[in-house]
Image (cartoon, rainbow, N blue to C red):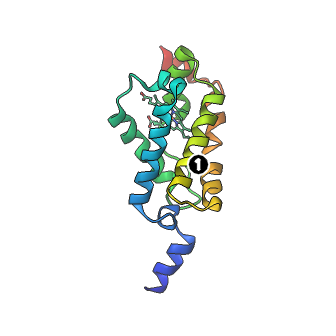
Amino acid sequence: KTLTAVVEHHAGALLYRLGGADVVKRIVEAFYRRLYANERLLLFLHDKDVISLRAKQAAFMSWLFGPPNQSYSGKNLRIAHLRLIKQRGFSPEDFEVGLVYFADAMRELGSPEAIVSEVMSKMRPFKDVIFTPSARDAEEEA
Ligand code: HEM
């Protein structure tokens, strides 16, 4: 192994520290399996196209497991969840359940607790983003 490879392995993107794209893919699968097994969450997901949902999530995941200190440049997550909030009562408690499922999915695939915490601290701030009313809400609902 080159020095660069070793340094990247230890200090680089979570993706590599977790064991690469295949492990991340399996984490995401385990996460979705949990979401869809929850009857209440199914209320929000039953009529959504899993394939397109997964494709959208892919951009988020590549940020989540990508190099540190970068901001998420994907679609505004309040806008993405707004209809679920307004029309179906998607709540902060539901989101918390999602976070727990993600952490559990990571543990299932053998992620160390330190990395699970690191990922949770990147995901948790989106709870406020998603559930805080914004001036753009009206525009989206129109
Ligand atoms: C998009 C549901 C939790 C991040 C979506 C969409 C649905 C959904 C239905 C697609 C909206 C559309 O049709 O465009 C749920 C449910 C959750 C949950 C039921 C249960 C807890 C989370 C969590 C995160 C997250 C914990 C991580 C912060 C995203 C992202 C997108 C998305 C990144 C794609 C945004 C885009 O680019 O369009 N979610 N979500 N969701 N959700 Fe969630």
Q: Secondary structure at mark 1?
A: helix
Q: How many marks?
A: 1
Location of residue 75 in the rendering, given as x and y in whole percent from the top left corner: 47, 37
User: Residue at position x 61%, y 42% from top?
Assistant: 100
Image point (40%, 52%), residue name: 25
Residue that numbered label 1 is attached to = 103
Residue 79 or residue 113, whichever sits in front: 113
State the image quarter where residue 101 is shown.
top right
Q: From what the image shows, is residue 136 above or below residue 27?
A: above
Figure check: 40 above or below 14: above
Q: Position of residue 14 (x, y in %)?
A: 53, 62
Q: Residue furthest bottom?
A: 2
Residue 7 to residue 121: above or below: below
Residue 84, position as x, y percentages in the image: 52, 21
Name the residue located 60 percent from the left edge and 33 percent from the top edge: 95
Q: Which x, y percent locates residue 98?
A: 57, 37
User: Which image quarter holds the N terminus?
Assistant: bottom left
123 or 108, which lies in front?
Answer: 108
Residue ID at (57%, 23%): 90
Q: Amino acid at mark 1?
A: Ala
Q: Is residue 135 above or below residue 76?
A: above
Left or right of 60, for residue 90: right
Q: Is mark 1 within 8 Å of ligand 1?
A: no
- Of 121 and 105, nearer the camera is 105
**Left or right of 46 in this view: 114:** right
Q: Label 1: few (<14), some or many (≥20) within 10 Å?
A: many
